Amino acid sequence: MTEASPGAAAPPVRVPSVSPALVAVPTRAVAPAGWEPEPAWSAPVQVQRAADLLVGRHLVVLTGAGLSTDSGIPDYRGPGARPRSPMTFAEFVSGPVARRRYWARSHVGWGRMRQADPNAGHRAVARLGADLVITQNVDGLHERAGTDPLVALHGRISEVVCLSCRTLTSRADLHERLTALNPGYFEAHADAAVNPDGDVELDDTDGFVVPDCEVCGGILKPHVVFFGENVEAPVVARCFAAVDALSPADGAVLVAGSSLAVMSGLRFVRRAARAGVPVVIVNRGWTRGDALADVRVQGGVADVLTTVADARR
């Protein structure tokens, strides 16, 4: 990749086309009014039913934000979650004001998120011996827990991509650049409430300085999938292939800590259910896939996953 000459205009931003089969749709399903979990879902015997079903089977695991709450990262739709509207891709590329707002909030949030450690749930997932773990989380905690094989469906907040030349760089390096350009900003807002995306609730973003790509001068974006942006086709294909390789006789899908409110994760559960592959869902609160579950467990994700991992040893 040739470095742009001084004063040269940045290459145009590559705005990806939107494919309905791959897109992370900004509309999200919500729990029906008055929804309450079935009492049986919280019974201790339900955890044992989940463990018994999953022993000895090939396994695809799908995890969501509820898995990282014990690491101090809030979830999107669990009990007590604050209503919020994450920035869409269209808004991000609309102009410098939106990007300044995003990077100011994200600078503070990532400075705190990167200090989070994997919890017992992440460690249990790493012990499951799954054929594939698909995570909707961007926090990198599965990687740090040693989970393999792993697909980060929505990308990793620890990476930054240039929208023009597509160069990937480290978020840690960008954090140092942002700190140098905005001295004292992180410390001044260190108490702001953190969101699941790794940003914070913050309105004071005027004057925040955002650097450009050091290679070509293009726009920098976290290497994660925004609402309204495509999940990469090879990533989706790998996930579907893992689900399609499961059989009803000796395979299963385990959902942990996800409400399945967006189609990017729900489609894999639907695919398994249509093929007759057993589905186990563990979540604290409503999920969009409840009707598809062979076993539904209502409760703390880490404790249930630890029981399942112990049973599969």
Image (cartoon, rainbow, N blue to C red):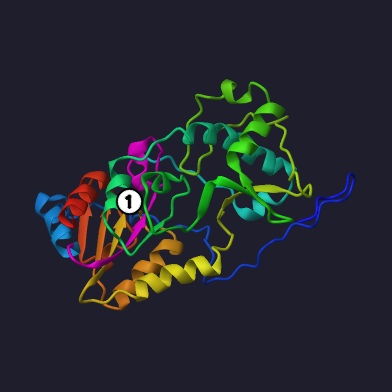
Left or right placement of residue 109 versus residue 308 in this view: right
Residue 273 at least partly seen: yes
Q: Position of residue 220 (x, y in %)?
A: 68, 47
Q: Is 70 positioned to the left or the right of 101 in the image? A: left
Residue 8 located left or right of residue 280:
right
Residue 55 x, y percent position in the rendering: 17, 62
Q: Residue sitting at 68 percent across and 33 percent down?
A: 177
The N terminus - image quarter = bottom right
Relative height, residue 168 to residue 269 (above, below): above
- Residue ID for mark 1: 257
The span shown in magenta is: 55-80
On screen, 114 above or below 121?
above
Amino acid type of the residue that numbered disc 1 sits on in the rendered structure:
Gly
The stretch drawn in magenta includes residue 185: no
* Residue 21 percent across, percent down from the top left: 52, 72
Specify few, some or many for label 1: CA neighbours under 10 Å numbering under 14, 14-19, or 20 or more: many
* In-front residue for pair 157/24: 157
Q: Which of the 4 quarters of the picture holds residue 141?
A: top left
| Front-most of residues 95 and 53 | 53
Q: Looking at the image, which residue sits at the far left?
A: 45
Residue in view at x 54 percent, y 65 percent: 23
Image height of 85 relative to 265, above or below: above
Picture coordinates of residue 212 (x, y %)? 74, 43
Quadrant position of residue 261: bottom left
Which image quarter holds the C terminus? Answer: bottom left
